Image (spheres, coloured by chain):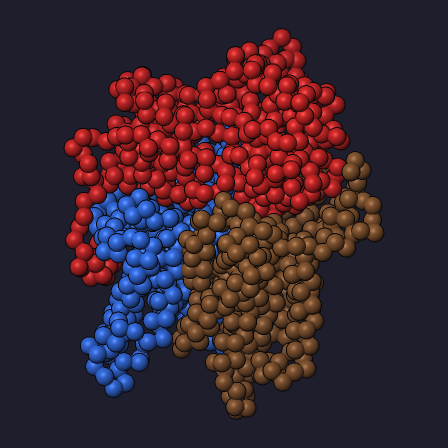
Amino acid sequence: MINRYNSRNIEAICIPLAALLFSLLLFGIFCAFAGADPFGVYASIYRSAFGSWRAFQNTLLRAAPLMLSSLCTALPARLGLIIIGNEGAIVVGGLGAVAAGLTLSTAPPTIVQVAMAIAAILCGGLWIGAVGALRHYRGVNETISSLLLNYIAIALLNHLVGGPMRDPSSLNKPSSYPIAQINMLGDIPGTRVHYGLIYGLVACVIAYFLIQRTTFGFAARVAGGNIRAARIAGLPVGKLTMMICFLAGSCAGLAGMVEVAAVHGRANESLNANYGYSGILVAFIARHNPLAATLVAILLGGILASGGSLQRSHDLPDATVLVFQGLVFLVVLFSESLYGRFFKEGSGVRGQRSAVTI
Amino acid sequence: MSQRIYLSRRQVVRGLLATTAFGVTAKLGTGCTPTPETQATTAGSGDNPLVIGFIYVGPKDDYGYNQAHAEGAAGIAQLPGVRVVDEANVPETTAVEESMRNMIEEDGVTVLFPTSFGYYDPHILKIAQEYPEVQFFHCGGLYQEGVHPDNVGSYFGYIDEAQYIAGVVAGHTSQTGRLGFVAAKPIPQVLRNINSFTLGARSVDPEMTTQVIFTGDWALPVREAEATNSMADQGIDVVTCHVDSPKVVMETAQKRGIFCSGYHANQAELAPQGYLTGAEWDWTQVYTNYVEMIRAGKTLQNGGIPHLVRGGLQDGFLKLSPYGNAVSADAKQSADAAKAEFMDGDMIVYRGEMKDNTGKVVIPAGKNFQQQDQELEKMNWLVTGVVGNVSS
Amino acid sequence: MDQALGWWGVPLAIAAGTLRGSAPFLFVSLGECLTEKSGKINLGLEGTLLIGAMSAYAIAYLTGSPWLGVITAGVAGMMLGVIHGWLSQQPRVNDVAVGIAMIIFGSGIAFFLGKPFIQPSAPPLPALQFGAWSNLPQVQSALQISPLFLLGVAIAPLMQWFFRSTRWGLYIRAVGDSPDAAKAMGISIFKVRMLCIVAGSFLAGIGGAYLSLYYPGSWNERISGGQGLMAVALVIFARWRPMQCLYASLLFGGAQAIGPALQSVGIDSYYYLFNASPYILTLLIMILTCSPKRTLNGAPGALGQ
């Protein structure tokens, strides 16, 4: 984020911009082949994602869970671990939050909300923390174990809301008992965006400082660079692994709590809404930088927000937004290979132009 | 709504939001410089067409639930003065709230049909409060007078009537006396179909049983195929289903050489030898009724449109697939007789005394439930003769 | 026809489910095994599987020839493979990230182009009958085997032999284990990895064709149900050995049948948990068999770097 050289600053702005422009160009061509007017499509995307405060709130609302979810991948990545168990951690976090919210339903709202958050943090944290522990003590590959835990968490959710936790009055969509309206998280005053956005932003900022500015973060980055060297240097690699995994899981768990306490008011299959997999993508696009993750989450939120108008105004099928999303992220990923390529001999302006006309 | 105030933090957050907002808008703004802002909302507001919004939880062409609704929507889009906008694959999260909001604000939608059950609580209830002038019609929801906003209504069809008749046909056709039902989840709408199908079959032969297998979700093609196969292995010779897309069940039944009975839409061509009949929706009829009521100036708010609309064969909400080649003349005769009773409104499927499959009395002697009875929409038991369990 | 098997139906259903349902796992995991041996991960095979399923169904419907569909599925998979192979080898581009983006892109394209093919019925792949000796229809049906599955079973030992005993296999292992040494041998790392990724995607595409043209045998947007992602994970479970990929795929294929089979004989509670049994089982096996003392045997050295 902090660059000493001007040229790197120019790159950091121009390359993502050029990548976005280029992916829009590709998507425009795709739409033209599909029989839609590309310029009309651009206008619709802009209008429905960023064009007005009302539209932008839609984007923010969709970005909020992605920020927390992305940290579940971004934090362990600093330690060299690829964890894709976000979906599972969100689900168990939501289950923990509901359990806490229902147990304490008579306490004052603030206490209930805090308890729900703590329960979600603990559940999500232990869920992914177990992945770290398995990695450290048993050498189980963290990517596969966290993926397996996703499926197990979803099965657990379906089993619990369909049986032991089911509210008999939730007829055609089996759900847990609802938490009281008064204990719900409200919206940020003056908006329709719930407090999950603030949780996400705050968590990303904390995560950034934790990784970049503390000895703990430094140790994690060293260990991530070379585990053997870190062991020789006397770093507690096992403890670091489990701590980072716990923190990662707790962020995703908190996302589950927000879904329960700000959106659904109860636990049911809607907890499993693909925020986990989108979060992985956000983390990788942001190169595991928590601050960049907030921006990428907003970008993805904007893309998702534009999906509806593509269907309604341009008669494009619902899969179009997937193609758009895929194109943007492939081009953005490619653009990462361009850093440092244009300033060896040429000027910034030339570099930018050639990036656009690839 | 509890709105807590973070005074000190709010300023910070506003600042953060404003900067990111600016940053990203600037980014995409440059991407769109050559394009002028277009106004979609003004289209044809001169003669005020009725703009109706449809929202589906899955793809529009799934050979099942969503397609049945999409065909209904396409049906009323033909009517003069009606414009339909729709969105598919909208999950049951804040996403559906935003879709409804955008349809209202950008397309000028005044009537909404969000078709998935899970949209109702909390999403429709929340948006309906914000837009009291817009009418929300929800498929399958249970409207509660005085609790839910009065611009919300719900509609559903008693498709179990068609399943009952399909059960009669199955009861005549089965050689082994064992029927199979591939079901997604043990929820009232599904349980009622299983029960009615079984009761239909047992009206022919009281010894008939229906084996039910719950797959656990609405669209799991491999597991649906496995379920059908394991039923065939167990000697079951007629299967039907209640999943989002019955295509796989029908095709697997065809491969195994057993009979099948369709659901949601007509699947006859998927199983030309074994297809008996099927329970189909006719949403075009339902939606046309709504359009006519709205055109006549009736609304939910002024009491012109009832909040709960329900209907069966009699009201044209459903139809039966034409009988397949394997259906005997006897079977046709008793199925047609049952159908005639439904058409006259004389048929009572759920009459006391009725026991569930654990032996518990669920409808006491002397008590009869009409199809319209709300109790039936809360069904949580399986009738005698069903092999299965409602708990997960 | 009337014979009910009762409890014997459970092992039969699992055996039949294994023969019917494991081919997609097998093809994708063999493809991924080849890819990872060269030192790159391709998580995007879920998208490849969907593209394969869609294109196979579409071509089989349009031309009437299911085998042409199978070939097309492989070719369509290769096209995605080229994108992945090129992109993931650019400097500073992470292959896992490209894979996830490719899942989205691949499934997006498959759903977009596949809309018109959900309704029609394409001709299915023929099956070989191995059950004529039995007079039980259940056994006869269980022993209907797709030639495509047999092909996959044959590829597994072939691939094992290929890695162990051929010069090309050695090149791939060299590129995957120590790229520097491979470079010193004069091997083009880019070309070897590209070929492996493209060939792996070809196999995954074929796996998709099996889904849409044989079992469950139709095209819709939920057809894969995450099988592609699971199959990628299987490769790690199988320690990058093609024969173990085969065993792991059989295990997963069979496990899909456990839930429905148990319900059909009357064990009708906890089916969500029974349906999750393959995942629980895999996790347990990994916990029991892994060890922190040694790195995974057979793990390509350059993987994830």
**Quarter of the image where the C terminus of chain B is located:** top right
Give the mark count. 0
Question: Residue at (51%, 34%) from the top-left corner?
Answer: B265
Find residue B310 and report its horizontal and vertical position in percent.
Answer: 45, 21
Q: The chain drawn blue is chain what?
A: A
In the rendered image, the quadrant that contains the N terminus of chain B is: top left
Residue B105 in the image: x percent, y percent?
Answer: 24, 38
Can see residue A335?
A: yes
Query: Could you say where residue B120 lies in the image, as x and y percent from the top left?
Result: 41, 32
Left or right, C267 with respect to C85, comes to right
Does residue B44 sit above or below B38 in this rendering?
Answer: above
Residue at x 52% of width, y 83% of height: C179
From the image, state the color of chain B: red
Above or below C77: residue A303? above
Q: Is residue A125 visible?
A: no
The residue at 70%/71% (across/down) is C157
Q: Residue at x 42, y 60 (%)?
A: C105
Left/right placement of residue B43 relative to residue C40 reads left
Instruction: Estimate the x, y position of residue C106 in percent, counting from the top left.
Output: 45, 60
Seen from the viewer's position, the closer of residues A155 and C79 is C79
Q: Residue placed farthest to the top in the image? A: B366
What tint does the image give chain C?
brown
Of residues A349 and A231, the one nearer the viewer is A349
Q: From the viewer's perspective, is residue C63 above or below residue B217?
A: below
